[in-house]
């Protein structure tokens, strides 16, 4: 019984981290909040895999992949790159930001959180 209790506590903590990251990204999709969103979703996905619950893994993968393009561009923009390339990446980041933030307010994300 105590092993199950420990798993529940861990999942609750990671779910809390995911909720906090989602709130942060909705407010300000900067590099660090997007990174935390990806980390939290991956930790929950691993936990679900280890506990044998595969139903929500696909939803977490979807969420993580939505943040992936934005995170990739943040990493690239952190490097010193020529002006035209940086300008192109900033434009792509703006589009990736919109593509991430809108779905975070969707019923799909709300259902995922409720299921977790």
Image (cartoon, helix red, strand yellow):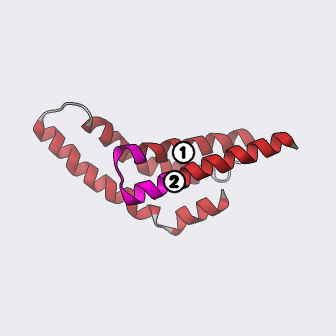
Q: Which mark identifies residue 40?
A: 1
For mark 2, what is the residue? 20
Q: Secondary structure at mark 2?
A: helix
Q: Is residue 33 magenta?
A: yes
Separation of residues labelled 1 and 2 (CA atoms): 9 Å
| Quarter of the C terminus within the rendering | bottom right
Q: Main secondary structure of the magenta part?
A: helix
Among all residues in the image, which is located at the extreme right?
Answer: 1
Q: Quadrant of residue 84?
A: top left
Question: Which image quarter: residue 98?
Answer: bottom left
Q: Nearer the viewer, residue 21 or 58?
A: 21
* Figure label count: 2
Q: Examine the image and state in which quarter residue 10 appears.
A: top right
* Numbered range of the magenta stretch: 20-34
Which residue shows up at 68% across the image and 47% down it?
A: 11
Q: Is residue 95 left or right of residue 83?
A: right
Residue 92: within the magenta?
A: no
The answer to whether residue 108 of the structure is visible from this angle is: yes
Neighbour class for label 2 at 10 Å: few (<14), some, many (≥20)?
some
Q: CB atoms at circles 1 and 2 under 8 Å apart?
A: yes
């Amino acid at each position: 019984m105590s092993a199950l209790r420990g798993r529940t506590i861990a999942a609750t903590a990671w779910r809390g981290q995911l909720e906090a990251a989602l709130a942060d990204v909705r407010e300000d999709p900067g590099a660090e909040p997007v990174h935390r969103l990806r980390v939290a979703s991956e930790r929950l996905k691993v936990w679900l895999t280890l506990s044998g619950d595969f139903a929500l893994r696909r939803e977490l993968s979807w969420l993580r992949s939505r943040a992936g393009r934005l995170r990739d561009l943040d990493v690239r923009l952190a490097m010193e790159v020529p002006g035209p390339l940086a300008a192109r990446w900033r434009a792509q980041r703006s589009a990736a930001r919109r593509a991430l933030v809108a779905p975070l307010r969707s019923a799909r994300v709300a259902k995922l959180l409720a299921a977790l």
